Amino acid sequence: MVVPVPPGGPSVQTFGLTYQFPDRSTGVSDITLDLPPRSRTLLIGANGAGKTTLLRLLAGKRLAPAGAIRVGGVDPFKDGLEGVTYLGLEWVLNAIVRTDIGVDELLRSVGGDYYPARRDELVAVLDIDTAWRMHAVSDGERRRVQLAMGLIRPWTVLLLDEITVDLDVWSRSQFLAFLYRETELRGCTVVYATHILDNLAGWPTHLVHMHMGTVRGWGPADELLRAAEEEAAAAPPQPGDDVLLASGNSRLGQLVLRWLRDDLKVRGPRSQNRRGPEGRSYTTGGIGGYGFEPKAPSS
Ligand SMILES: Nc1ncnc2c1ncn2[C@@H]1O[C@H](COP(=O)(O)OP(=O)(O)OP(=O)(O)O)[C@@H](O)[C@H]1O
C-alpha cells in the first residue's frame, strides 16, 4: 500500500535501528533519530561509517527490523510513503545513460511530459542542453541529466547518497538551492550523505554524525555548531589544530574536520579494527555522544 504524505510533510524516524549484513557483520547499530518534516539533514562520517547502509534502510532497500523505521509515519518496507526517492550509486550506474540516446527522450521516459514545469526548471537549474546525446557528454553533464531524471517526479522525501561529485561548483550550488526550495516551498524532507561541504554553510537544518555504524550525535545544525565551537574554545590545544585553523573552512567544515579527527583517534588504524564474523570490533572511549531525545512513535 502507498500511503499519502501527512499534512505538514514527512518526518524520518528510526528507533534503536540495528542491521546486520548477510555475512552477519553489523551494518548499523542502535540508531535512534527523529528528523522533522521539511528538514535538510546531512549525514556526516568517514568512509565506511554506515551512511549508505542507513540511507538504503530508510529507502526500504534493505529489510530493517519491524518498527525500527518510519518515513512519514509508515514502515518503508511494509507500506511505503508516496514519493520517496532514493538516489545512490546503483541508480548512477544505470547503463542507459551511456547509450546513444537523447536527453528529451530520457526525460520523457521518467515522466517529463507529465511534469513539464518541473522538467523545465530542472533543465534550467542543472544547465542541461536537451540536444545532448548521452554517449557524447562529459561525466558532469551526464550526472546533471541523471539528477534531472531522478528528481522530475515530485518527491516528498529525498534520500541522497553523494552523487554530485562530478558537478562543477556553480551547478552544485544551483542544485543545492533547488533542494532548499523543495523543502521550503513544497514541504519535502531531504537526507543527504556527503563528504563535500562546499556551498553547504547555512543549508542543513540538522546534522547526523556517524561513526562505525553508530550515530555519535545528531541534532539541529545550529545547536551542534554552537556547542562544538564552545567545546573547542574551552579544550586544550590538540595535534592538528593548526591545520584546522589554517584550512579556511566554513564553521561546518571546521566541525566536520574535528569530528573526523576525533573519530580517527577513537577508531585507530583500520587494520586494527577489522570486522569479524560477529560484527564490528569497536574501539571504545574518546569523545562522548551527544544527541537529542527522539519523540515516541505516534502510533
Ligand atoms: N554488503 C555488505 N556486506 C558486508 N559489509 C558491508 C556491505 N556493504 C558495506 N559493508 C561495510 O559496512 C560498512 C559501512 O558501509 P557504508 O557503505 O554504509 O559506508 P559509508 O559511510 O556510506 O561510506 P563512504 O563514505 O565510503 O561511502 C563498511 O565498513 C563496509 O565495508
Image (tube, rainbow, N blue to C red):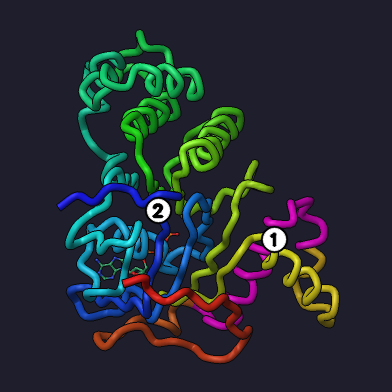
Residue that carries the numbered disc 1 in the rendered image: 222
Q: Residue furthest bottom?
A: 285
On the rendered structure, is 18 left or right of 236? left
Mark 2 residue crowding within 10 angstroms, few (<14) / some (14–19) / many (20+): many
Q: Position of residue 261 (x, y in %)?
A: 64, 71
Residue that carries the numbered disc 2 in the rendered image: 10
Q: Is residue 75 visible?
A: yes
Label 1's element? Answer: helix
Q: Position of residue 159 (x, y in %)?
A: 38, 50
Tell which tag, 1 or 2, sits nearer the viewer: 2
Nearer to me, 5 or 94: 5
On the rendered structure, is 121 left or right of 151? right
Nearer to me, 32 or 161: 32
Q: Which residues are magenta?
A: 244-269
Q: Quadrant of the C terminus?
A: bottom left
Indicate which quadrant contains ligand 1: bottom left
| Residue 250 sits inside the magenta stretch | yes
Q: Position of residue 276 (x, y in %)?
A: 29, 85
Task: Report the residue at 37% width, 44% height from top.
Answer: 156
Q: Residue furthest top?
A: 131
Q: Main secondary structure of the magenta part?
A: helix
**Which residue type carries mark 2?**
Pro
| Residue 245 sits inside the magenta stretch | yes
Task: Report the residue at 73% width, 71% height from top.
Answer: 228
**Mark 2 Cβ and ligand 1 under 8 Å apart:** no
Task: Report the residue at 54% width, 81% height from top.
Answer: 268
